[in-house]
Amino acid sequence: MIPLHIVCGALGAFVLCPLAAFAPKGGAVHRLAGRLLLIDVVLVALTGSLLLVDPLFMLIYWPEDSAAMGFTDIFRSAHYPEMFFLYLVVTLLYFSFSGARLWARVGHGHAERVRSNWLDWGLAIGMGGFALFFLALGILDWIHADRLASDFIAGPTVVLAFIGFDFYTFAARPAVHRFPWWFLHMTKMFVVWAGLIDAFWWRVRLKIIPAENMNTDFHIGTILWLGFTAIGVMVYRSHFRKSDRSRRP
């Protein structure tokens, strides 16, 4: 199951995400790559969830990986490994589907107001529950001066900011022309891309870098996300601004 999980993650990170990112926006290739990416994300989430009920993974592989990364006793989530992995799975599903769903919610830019359905609410509520749980663990880490406390405070805080805006759109149903929805879509999908690359890189590092040289403070996922977003804004801002102006009443 682990090889299949890794292959699915690598397919999304190095084939489908780049294809969707570099294809003309709104075109057939972009839409097809997006649909295939959602299928791939489901497979990543499914195989990852099945690993949690695999005794070999939880009793052998995870303790070895955790020790190699220095995660054994230094932060509270090490005591909740199943919850930690489910948090990663839910995060991947939330950003993938809420990002992809955004265009349907705004009628591809032609609706008057933002819409939502049970899937949008379910994704936000499920993600919010996990984010609050790990934010609490991060605060406990901070109280105990654990060195990864900032990771488990900053990460869930950023996620809760996205969720807060989602709930605002659910309740207030703002006019579509008020916000650059392309930016929110792009930002969420880049979280997915950066997360998949980061997860693959962790796996590679565990195999090629000695445990004593592992650097858990190098946040490649965050750097990639911010870098992808900055480049995306520079590349696509003028294109989407013209599209937004042409659709405004």
Image (cartoon, grey):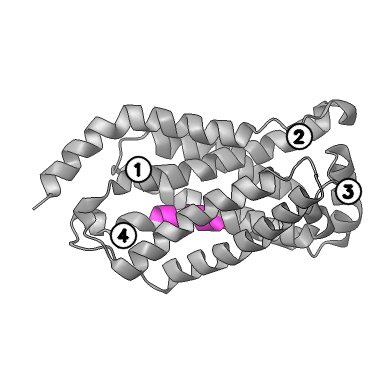
- Tell me which amino acid carries mark 1: Phe
Cα–Cα span, label 3 and label 2: 14 Å
Task: Please give the count of numbered marks on the rendered protein.
Answer: 4
- Tell me which amino acid carries mark 2: Thr
- Looking at the rendered structure, the secondary structure element under dot 3 is loop
Q: Which residues are magenta?
A: 93-100
Task: Identify the residue position indicated by label 3 in the image.
Answer: 73
Cα–Cα span, label 4 and label 2: 38 Å
Q: Residues within 10 Å of mark 1 (few under 14, many from 20)?
A: some
Task: Identify the residue position indicated by label 1 in the image.
Answer: 183
Up the image or down, 201 lies above or below 34; here it is above
- Tell me which amino acid carries mark 4: Ala
Task: Identify the residue position indicated by label 2 in the image.
Answer: 216
- Tell me which amino acid carries mark 3: Asp
Task: Identify the residue position indicated by label 4 in the image.
Answer: 104
The residue at the point 82 percent across, 32 percent down is 207
Q: Nearer the viewer, mark 1 or mark 3?
A: 3
The residue at the point 83 percent across, 44 percent down is 71
- Looking at the rendered structure, the secondary structure element under dot 4 is helix
Horizontal side, residue 1 vs residue 105: left or right: right
Mark 2 and mark 1 residues within 8 Å of each other at the beta carbon: no
Q: Nearer the viewer, mark 4 or mark 2?
A: 2
Q: Residues within 10 Å of mark 4 (few under 14, many from 20)?
A: some
The residue at the point 76 percent across, 34 percent down is 216
Mark 4 and mark 1 residues within 8 Å of each other at the beta carbon: no
Horizontal side, residue 225 vs residue 101: left or right: right
